Image (cartoon, grey):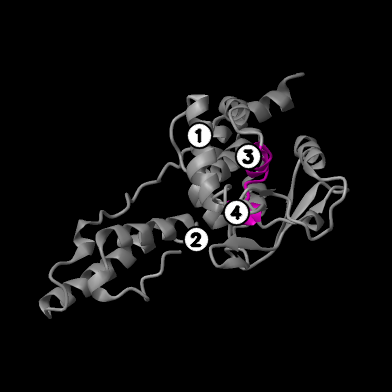
């Protein structure tokens, strides 16, 4: 989240406020109305600051409220996933496969160590997240188990070195500046701004942020018939309400023919 409390009033600008709103949306825990109400409170406070002569103008007045209706999040359709993955670099592809297969956040993925992977049960224990300041807790401050299929199991087995310690990181590559940095954990900025963007461009796909791979996972699960509660548990949402707010419209679309399909099964042989 982009905090505002450490920013001097005279240094607060429109771009910072927009980043703050975007971080609230990305947390996936606040309703659109709540975020817009927060913007309203900030705008009112800054109006008072202008009247008191503390700042020359209100930077929040140029920030648009979020639309009250559902905000569609772009994602890769099922037929686009292989195209995207085939366009990933050799170094990036295993991470991309994991993000799409599990819906993990990038910070959670690059913080994984080999002991987090339970190959016997095809599950990953998500317990930490890599942040700019180092490794910390997950966004919800709760651990969870994320299951995966045989394809990702094969990808991870092939990626695992013959000799590795349980606490060795899974995704290790060149530093942010390969010419001067030793091998280290993947840099989140490099993944999102370079590797992901290059894969989309090489695949001839539309531009979308890296977090769209998380939305891709959710849409893929729902498209293939998984229930909303499964999506909630995989993504680590504290409440099914959050999952329904972001992805319920996809489930509704898929369920339109459910009544007819059920009747067909019951009466089809009659």
The residues bearing labels 4 and 2 have C-alpha atoms spaced at a distance of: 37 Å
The residue to which callout 1 is attached is 198
The reply to whether discs 4 and 3 touch (Cβ–Cβ < 8 Å) is no
Which residue occupies the foreground of this view, 233 or 75?
Answer: 75
Question: From what the image shows, is residue 8 above or below residue 179?
Answer: below
Judge depth for marks 4 and 2 and give the one in front. 4
Pointer 1 or 4: first along the chain: 4
Q: Is residue 109 magenta?
A: yes
Helix, strand or loop: magenta stretch: helix
User: Which of marks 3 and 1 precedes in the sequence?
Assistant: 3
Residue 152 picture location, percent across and down: 75, 39
Q: Residue at x 81, y 38 (%)?
A: 158
The residue carrying mark 4 is: 181
Q: CA distance from mark 1 to mark 4?
A: 22 Å
Tell me the tag on residue 92: 3
Which residue is drawn at the image coordinates 45% and 61% (left, top)?
Answer: 30
- Which residue is disc 2 drawn over? 29
Q: Is residue 247 visible?
A: no
Question: Is label 1 in a helix, a strand or a loop?
Answer: helix
- Label 2's element? loop
The stretch drawn in magenta includes residue 244: no
Using the image as rendered, state which of residue 134 and residue 243 is in the foreground: 134
Q: Position of residue 264 (x, y in %)?
A: 68, 23
The magenta segment is 91-110
Q: CA distance from mark 1 to mark 3?
A: 11 Å
């Amino acid at each position: 989240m982009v905090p505002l409390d450490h920013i001097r009033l005279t240094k607060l600008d429109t771009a910072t406020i927009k980043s703050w709103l975007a971080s609230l949306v990305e947390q996936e825990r606040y309703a659109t109305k709540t975020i817009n109400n927060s913007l309203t409170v900030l705008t009112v406070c800054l109006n008072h600051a202008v009247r008191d002569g503390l700042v020359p103008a209100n930077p929040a007045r140029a920030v648009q409220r979020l639309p009250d209706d559902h905000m569609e999040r772009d994602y890769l359709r099922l037929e686009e996933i292989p195209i995207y993955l085939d366009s990933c670099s050799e170094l990036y592809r295993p991470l991309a496969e994991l993000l799409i297969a599990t819906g993990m956040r990038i910070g959670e993925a690059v913080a994984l160590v080999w002991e987090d992977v339970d190959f016997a049960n095809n599950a990953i224990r998500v317990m930490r997240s890599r942040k700019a300041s180092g490794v910390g807790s997950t966004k919800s401050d709760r651990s969870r188990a994320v299951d995966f299929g045989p394809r990702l199991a094969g990808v991870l087995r092939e990626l695992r070195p013959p000799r590795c310690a349980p606490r060795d990181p899974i995704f290790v590559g060149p530093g942010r500046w390969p010419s001067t940095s030793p091998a280290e954990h993947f840099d989140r900025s490099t993944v999102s701004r370079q590797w992901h963007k290059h894969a989309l461009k090489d695949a001839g796909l539309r531009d979308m942020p890296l977090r769209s791979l998380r939305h891709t996972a959710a849409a893929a699960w729902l498209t293939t018939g998984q229930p909303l509660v499964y999506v909630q548990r995989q993504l680590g949402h504290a409440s099914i309400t959050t999952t329904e707010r972001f992805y319920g419209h996809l489930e509704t679309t898929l369920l339109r023919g459910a009544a007819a399909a059920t009747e067909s099964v019951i009466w089809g042989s009659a």
